[in-house]
């Protein structure tokens, strides 16, 4: 069994995270509960930062916070000296509430509204990553009206699409994001921005995929973007001070995944950029990266209580837990794989095959198709590992299930950082029919 970060098994055979016995967490907070190993988060953050420092390259490591957005994780990111990617007014609002340093906030999104852009100006954030021509117009208009400067990057599609185990280079990328690098859109965007009075054009951004194990894909993207930068220097005498190469660094969900150390991806990127800058005598740009999953993914574990079981003779045995697609949509959404264990009996052989089902009214609500566990008893604690990214942030109230509690653990201490939803929370936006409407809608 693979344990992550500070996880151990104590003398009672219980899983511990951050030095805390998970059965203690469950008696305090109930299930389902999401537990974050903050030491592992910090280790990952420092790993990225140290790599750039070792290479002598100016950098910003921006936490792509759509992976898990909350006040406490933003505070932790701030404390670790990270920058922050937000993709909506709601995430920006959360960052503001967490008193995140505005100059280190970067705003992404392929359809930012005028209100969202205005909000970014009001908060004087560090950078807007522009995605399309409508946005260029809106930003120029707002900047001119307010006589306020804004740093911008433009998001480009460099024609490389990376998946877990391989990548493809496509001439023209079919993506809803960004400006195409090859067909002239990127140059057009650059020309519309780089000499504007209130626009401080920093350079280009790309994000080529997610859960990538392949360093060549990052290398390719870095090369393509550097080539464009060199071209702009020749044609426009313009030097881009920043190169943003996005996130997407893969992590280990199951034993089938063999990622490199997260910082190894960054090391390759830095080397390529450095080499090309040297060859072209181009000033080494500041490199920005945007890890999401690789900062919070394996730091998170979800604990569920086992409920009913059902045997389908000759086919499989189900065990149902007290959560499911409402707190982790990834298996149903894209067949994501996870590993698991019975957290209160870690030392028993995990050699029976189970299918872990959720409690939502969907046949597809299965968390793990093939889980190896001891014989599960009702009331056992089921740990699903590596659930820190794109789970709580995608959670819903489907079937009106309250969303779980989220707890940070470190050094034998634990702290509730998102409280469990209550039934009251669940109806708090609902408005009852008024007397008059009751008549209309009867
Ligand atoms: C989602 C996203 C990321 C983070 O991706 P991970 O796979 O979680 O590392 C980074 N940059 C952008 C622009 C994104 O949309």
Image (cartoon, rainbow, N blue to C red):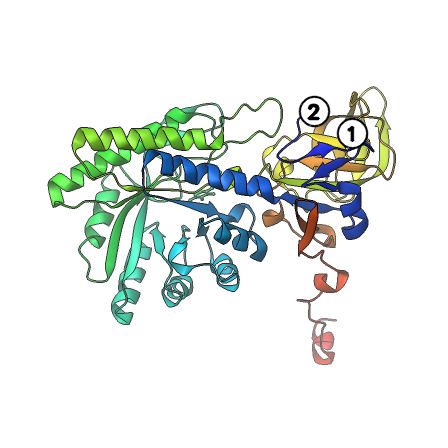
Bin the neighbour count of mark 1 within 10 Å (Cα to Cα): few under 14, some 14-19, many 20 and up: some
Q: Nearer the viewer, residue 415 or 64?
A: 415
Residue sitting at 46 percent across and 52 percent down? 87
Residue 432: image quadrant is bottom right
- Distance between the alpha carbons at the discs numbered 1 and 2: 9 Å
For the residue labelled by badge 1, is the local secondary structure a helix, a strand or a loop?
loop
Is the CB of mark 2 within 8 Å of ligand 1? Answer: no
Residue 33 visible somewhere in the drawing: yes
Circle 2 is placed at which residue position? 1
Q: Nearer the viewer, residue 108 or 148?
A: 148
Circle 1 is placed at which residue position? 346
Residue sitting at 50 percent across and 49 percent down? 65
Q: How many marks?
A: 2
Residue sitting at 41 percent across and 57 percent down? 112
Residue 331: image quadrant is top right
Residue 159 visible somewhere in the drawing: no
Q: Picture coordinates of residue 282 (x, y %)?
A: 18, 37
Residue 194, relative to residue 167: is it above or below? below
Residue 166: image quadrant is top left
Q: Picture coordinates of residue 288 (x, y %)?
A: 36, 43
Q: Picture coordinates of residue 5 (x, y %)?
A: 61, 34
The answer to whether 204 appears left or right of 422 in the picture is: left
The answer to whether 298 appears left or right of 184 in the picture is: right
Bin the neighbour count of mark 2 within 10 Å (Cα to Cα): few under 14, some 14-19, many 20 and up: few
Quadrant in which the C terminus is drawn: bottom right
Q: Do labels 1 and 2 touch, CB within 8 Å?
A: yes
């Amino acid at each position: 069994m693979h344990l992550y970060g500070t996880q151990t098994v104590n003398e009672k055979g219980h899983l511990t995270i951050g030095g805390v016995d998970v059965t203690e967490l469950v008696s305090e907070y109930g299930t389902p509960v999401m537990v974050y190993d903050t030491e592992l988060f910090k280790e990952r953050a420092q790993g990225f930062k140290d790599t750039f420092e070792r290479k002598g390259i100016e950098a910003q490591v921006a936490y792509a916070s759509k992976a898990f957005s909350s006040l406490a994780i933003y505070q932790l990111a701030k404390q670790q000296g990270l920058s922050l990617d937000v993709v909506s007014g709601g995430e920006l609002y959360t960052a503001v509430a967490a008193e995140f340093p505005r100059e280190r906030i970067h705003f992404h999104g392929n359809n930012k509204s005028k209100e969202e852009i205005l909000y970014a100006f009001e908060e004087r954030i560090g950078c807007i990553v522009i995605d399309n021509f409508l946005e260029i117009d809106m930003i120029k208009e707002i900047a001119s009206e307010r006589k306020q400067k804004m740093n911008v990057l433009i998001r480009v599609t460099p024609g490389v699409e990376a998946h877990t185990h391989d990548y493809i280079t496509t001439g023209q990328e079919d993506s809803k994001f960004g400006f195409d690098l090859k067909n002239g859109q990127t140059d057009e965007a650059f020309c519309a921005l780089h000499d504007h009075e209130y626009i401080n054009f920093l350079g280009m951004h790309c994000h080529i995929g997610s859960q990538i194990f392949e360093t060549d894909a990052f290398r390719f993207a870095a090369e393509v973007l550097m080539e464009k930068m060199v071209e702009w220097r020749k044609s426009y005498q313009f030097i881009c001070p920043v190169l943003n190469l996005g996130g997407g660094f893969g992590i280990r969900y199951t034993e089938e995944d063999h990622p490199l150390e997260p910082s190894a991806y960054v090391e390759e990127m830095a080397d390529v950029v450095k080499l090309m800058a040297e060859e072209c005598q181009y000033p080494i740009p500041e490199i920005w990266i945007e890890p999401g999953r690789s900062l919070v993914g394996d730091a998170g574990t979800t604990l569920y209580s086992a409920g009913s079981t059902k045997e389908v003779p000759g086919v499989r045995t189900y065990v149902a837990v007290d959560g499911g697609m409402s707190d982790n949509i990834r298996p149903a959404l894209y067949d994501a794989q996870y590993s698991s264990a019975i957290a209160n009996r870690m030392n028993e052989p995990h050699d029976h095959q189970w299918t872990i089902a959720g409690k939502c009214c969907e046949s597809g609500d299965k968390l793990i198709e093939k889980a190896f566990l001891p014989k599960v008893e009702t009331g056992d604690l089921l740990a699903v590992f590596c659930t820190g990214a794109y789970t709580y942030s995608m959670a819903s109230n489907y079937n009106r299930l309250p969303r779980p509690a989220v707890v940070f653990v470190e050094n034998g201490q634990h702290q509730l950082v998102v409280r469990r939803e209550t039934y009251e929370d669940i109806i708090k936006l609902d408005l009852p029919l008024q007397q008059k409407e009751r008549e209309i809608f009867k």
